Amino acid sequence: MTAGGSDLIPASQPADAPAPATAAVAGAAPVAPGTSARQGRLRRLPVPGWWPLAAVLAVQAVLSLRLVRADTAFQDEALYLWAGHLQWAHWLHGAAVPPFAYYFSGAPVIYPPIGALADSIGGLAGARILSLAFMLGATTLLWATAGRLFGRRAAFFAAALFAVLGPTLHLGSFATYDAMSVFLIALAAWCVIRAGERGEATGWMVAAGAALALANAAAYSSVLFDLFVLALALITVFPESGRLAARRAATLLTAVAALLIAGLLIGGSAYLSGIERTTLERAAGTDNPLTVLADSWSWAGLILALAVCGVIISWASRQGRAQTWLLAILAIAAVLGPLEQAHLHTTASLNKHVGLGAWFAAIAAGYAIDKFITTAPAGQTRAITCGACVIALAFPLALGASQSWAFATSWPNATSFTAILRPLADHGTGRLLVEDPSIAEYYLPAGTQWQRWSSTRNIVLPSGASSGGPSSAAGIAGDGNPGTYGLHIEEGYFSLVALNFTDTTPLDHDITADLRRNPHYHIIRVIPYGIEIPPLGQGTYVIWQYKP
C-alpha cells in the first residue's frame, strides 16, 4: 500500500497518477519499435489531463442551460425564492415573515436566501444558473472521487454518465435546494475519500461532517445518504485498521450530530415540528409503488445495471472483499430513494432523489466500464474499445436530454395568469385566496404583503396566524378544512378567489359551492393555462371577485 493512497486502487493505476499525454481516457499509443524515447515524446500532443472533465462539464452545462428559460417558475422554485426575499427583508429591516420552518422540508435560512440573492442579480434564470453551478461542482467532485478510487478512465465514464442523466440536467436548471444538497453530499464523500489512510484524518472527517450537516439542514431528506458517506469512511481504511476506521466514523458522526443539534437548538421547536411534518411523519400518497420503481428505472436504470456489473466483476475477479463491498454499497445508493418513495406511494420529487443516489452508483458504473475496457489487449485494440464506449455515451446523452426537457416543461406556464392577476392584486388591499399562490407571490409585487395571501391548504389571518389547515392525517400538503373556508367566504373575507381545480379538487368544488351561495361573489375571469390534457381539455383558473 502506498502512502496517501488506498488499498482499493490497483497499483498499476494509481488515482493521482498523471494522465497519459496523448489521451486521458483512451491512453497513449505505444511508440513504434526502434523509435527513441525522445522522438516518442516529441510525437505526443501536449493535451492536459483534465480535458475529458472539461468536455463533460461543457456538455452538461449546455444541456442544462437550454432548460433555464423553458418555462415559468415551478411552485417550489417560486416558494423558495419568494421566501428568501422575505427572509432578507426580515434580517435587514425586521419585517415579519411567515412560519416557514413549520412546513418547509429544509431550513428556510439556508438555500432560500442564497437563491434569492441569485434571483436579485439575474432573475429566475440567475437562480437556476446557481443550481447549475452546484451540479457542475457535483460532477467535478464525482470525477475526483472516482479517480482516487479507481483511476482516471473510470472517473471519466462515471462523470459522463452522471452528467447526462435526465435528473442531473433538470436539477441543473431548477432553482430549489436540491442541487445544493447534491453538491454538499458529494463534497462530504470526496473529503472522506481524499483523506486516504492518513491516520486519524480528523480535519477531513470534520470537513465531511460539516458538509453533511449543511446538506441535511438544506434538505432534510438528504439524511438518508449520510449512511453512504459513513460507509465510505469505514470501508476505505477498514482493511488496514478496523480500529482506525471506527475512529474515523466516530469523528464523522460526532461532527454531524453536534452541528445538527446546535442548529436545532438555535432554530427551536419550529424546526423540530417542520422535520416531523415534512420528513418523519410524511403522509403517504396514492401512487402505485410499481410506478415509482418503473419511473426510477427509466431515469437511472443504465447506471444501476452498470453498477451491479461492477460488483459482479469485482467479486468474480477476487479484487478483495473491501472493494466488492464498497461497490455494492455504491450500487445500493441508486435504489434507496426509489424504495423509500415506493413505500410512501408517491412520485413527488422522485427524480431529485434518483439523481442523488445516481451520484454514488455512477462511481461503480465507471469502474465496470473501465474493467470492460481493460479486458481488451493493450494497444490499438484497447484504444478502439475505449473509443467505442465513448461513442456509446450518445445513447444516455440523448435519453437524458429528452427526459430533462420533459421534467422542465411538466407544469403549466403561468405567464397569462400572472399578467391578469397583477392589476387585480397590486391595485387593491383585500385578501386573496389562490390555489397554489406561490407563483403569484413570487412574480407580483403584492407578494411581499404575505398576510394577504391564503391557499387552499391554509388560511392566513390578518395577524399572520394560520387557520383552516389540513388534518394531521392528510399531511401539510393536504386539503384545507372545508367548513372553515365556508365560514370565511360567508363573511366575505376574501376579495379575490382563484381556483384551478387541480391540486385540491374536492375542496375547490366545496369552495365554489360556497361562493355561489354568497350573492356578492361573481366570476370575473376564466384564464386558460397549461397544455391540452385529453379528455379533460385545457386547464383553467376561475377568478371570483367580492363585490358588496
Image: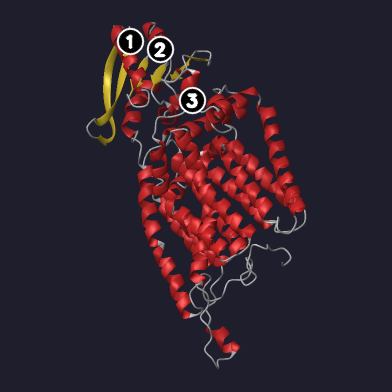
Q: Which mark is residue 485?
A: 2
Q: From the viewer's perspective, is residue 84 above or below residue 303?
A: above
Numbered circle sitting on residue 368: none
Q: Amino acid at mark 3?
A: Thr
Residue 168 vs residue 79, the one in the foreground: 168
C-alpha gap between disc 3 and disc 1: 28 Å
Q: Nearer the viewer, mark 2 or mark 3?
A: 2
Quarter of the image containing the N terminus? bottom right
Locate residue 259, reporting x and y percent: 70, 37
Q: Say which mark, if any, is on residue 514.
A: 1
N-terminal-most mark, 2 or 3: 3
In the rendered structure, which amino acid carries the disc numbered 2? Answer: Tyr
Q: Give the x, y percent position of residue 102.
A: 56, 24
Which numbered disc covers residue 448? 3
Query: Does the CB distance between marks 1 and 2 fall below 8 Å?
Result: yes
What is the crowding at mark 1: few (fewer than 14 residues within 10 Å), some, or many (at least 20)? many
Indicate the position of residue 434 as horizontal and vertical percent values.
Answer: 39, 22
